[in-house]
Amino acid sequence: PGIDLFGRLESLRIERGRTPRQVRDGVEILLTLDAGTASRRRPALIADPGRSAFLRTLTRGLAAAKGCRTDVLWAGDRPLAAALVALRPGAAWLWQLAADPGAGGDASAELLALEIARGVGRLRLDLLDM
């Protein structure tokens, strides 16, 4: 069943994963959500074992060096959207964003992106399209 995203704002929460374990869990959610929105023009990251293994390895190493985090928007125990944010002192990059099309879809992704931008504060936030 779909979720009335804006009628349930009080039940939404964002979890920010910063440790290697939290980032690992966030990346798995991101990969799962990304698979739900893949198309012939843009295949799912998880469909390519080399790309998904690279992403998993890269993000765990970056997390250990505090170079990335994952943000997941939740409604109860259901992930609505997930993002991978690359970090360095003074800057942040929204690298990948995926949302559950049956649970708010674009609205969930936009809300998460806005919250990421708001949370970045005085850092520069760039959007990467890869």
Image: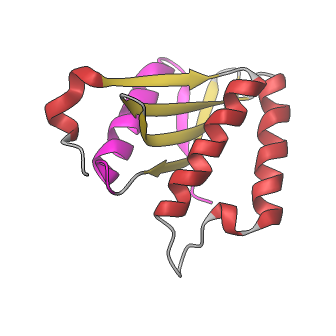
Side of 73 relative to 55 (left or right)? left
Residue at 53% x, 80% y: name it.
41
Tell me, yes or no, whether the highlighted magenta stretch contains residue 128: yes
Side of 99 relative to 58 (left or right)? left
Report the residue that reaches farthest toward the bottom.
Answer: 40
Q: Is residue 29 above or below residue 33?
A: above
Q: Nearer the viewer, residue 68 or 120?
A: 68
Q: Where residue 6 appears, x then y in whole percent?
A: 18, 35
Tell me, yes or no, whether the highlighted magenta stretch contains residue 3: no
Residue at 51% x, 52% y: name it.
33
Residue 95 visible here: no
Q: Nearer the viewer, residue 87 or 27?
A: 27
Q: Is residue 66 above or below residue 7?
A: above
Q: Where residue 106 appears, x then y in whole percent?
A: 32, 52
Residue at 28% x, 48% y: name it.
104
Report the residue that reaches farthest toward the left.
Answer: 7
Residue 16 visible here: yes
- Residue 76 occupies which quadrant of the picture? top left
- Tell me which segment is drawn in magenta: 102-130
Side of 1 relative to 94 (left or right)? left
Residue at 54% x, 57% y: name it.
34
Q: Where residue 71 appears, x then y in whole percent?
A: 53, 31
Q: Is residue 64 above or below residue 107?
A: above
Q: Quadrant of the C terminus?
A: bottom right
Q: Is residue 32 above or below residue 7?
A: below
The structure's colour scheme is: secondary structure
Q: Where residue 53 appears, x then y in whole percent?
A: 82, 54
